[in-house]
Amino acid sequence: MARPSRCRRICTEPAYDSFSPEGISCGERVVLTVDEYEVIRLIDLEKLTHEQCARQMDISRTTVTEVYEAARGKIADSIVHGKLLLIAGGNYRLCDGSAVRYCRKNCRKTDGMAQNQAVRAKGAGEMRIAVTFENGEVFQHFGHTGQFKIYDVEDGQITREQVIDTNGSGHGALSGFLGGMEVDTLICGGIGYGAKVALAEAGIELYGGVSGQADDAVKTFLAGNLDYNPDIQCSHHDHGHQEGHCQGHCGEDKHGCAGN
């Protein structure tokens, strides 16, 4: 007996439920289900990874990939062959607010501060923030951090703080380390391209290029005013390092923070 498919969680039903080719139509139609529409919205419009989309929709990443490929095929069929595209049906349920920690609606960057401002919308839920940590400050090399300071947040307020040793974990293992601790957000100094990709695949929001006191950085982040650099990159073998700190846009090489 076939295993029943898991009901897919969506934010809202589509505002537009049909699209018709202008001019000559073949007279046929393609039906895109609402859950297929949601996968297209999250991945192609909101730019979520398949892992992030899976968390938000409460399904597996494998299911997301299958639904995404099916949806793209239907859209291509409609565009290429001039078929009416309808959005209807499917196996889904409307979000009841339980996905607030994963939801990134209205969190796309329109300028350097937009992601910080969107944090206020998460106030009703819980989140866990990690900061690369050394002597009370934001440690400046993600791949070499010996500790993370972890902040549990509820309703926009810090409810718990703890310092965790990384036990010598290298670049490649740190994203998994954070994922295993159910961290939602990372604040750090310099970080390489490979590590950024690994964090994105783990569904962890990154705020790099931050310096100063770790506690102050988290409080500023929760207030929506954190000054960070979304394009930060770091290499220990490139220019721009003074007294062990990455100065902004360091070049990337195979021995840098990316952990290649």
Image: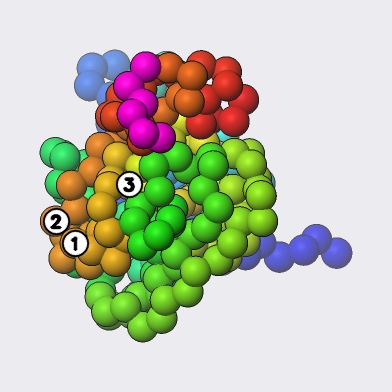
**For residue 225, which numbered disc appears in the image?**
2
CB atoms of marks 1 and 3 within 8 Å: no
Residue annotated with mark 1: 220
Q: Does 203 appear above or below 238?
A: below
Q: Between 141 and 112, which is closer to the camera in this rendering?
A: 141
Secondary structure beneath label 2: loop
Circles 2 and 1: CB distance less than 8 Å?
yes
Image position, residue 151 (x, y; %): 40, 71
Secondary structure at badge 3 equals: strand
Q: Position of residue 226 (x, y in %)?
A: 19, 53
Amino acid type for the residue under numbered disc 1: Thr
Give the x, y percent position of residue 58: 54, 63
The magenta segment: 239-244
Sequence order check, earlier mark of 2 and 3:
3
Using the image, determine if residue 71 lies above or below residue 166.
above
Give how far apart the Cα atoms at labels 1 and 3 are.
12 Å
Residue flagged by tag 2: what amino acid is it?
A: Asn
Indicate whether 145 appears above or below 74.
below
Q: Is residue 136 left or right of residue 204?
A: left
Disc 2 to disc 1, how far (Cα)? 5 Å
Q: Residues within 10 Å of mark 2 (few under 14, many from 20)?
A: some
- Residue under numbered circle 3: 207
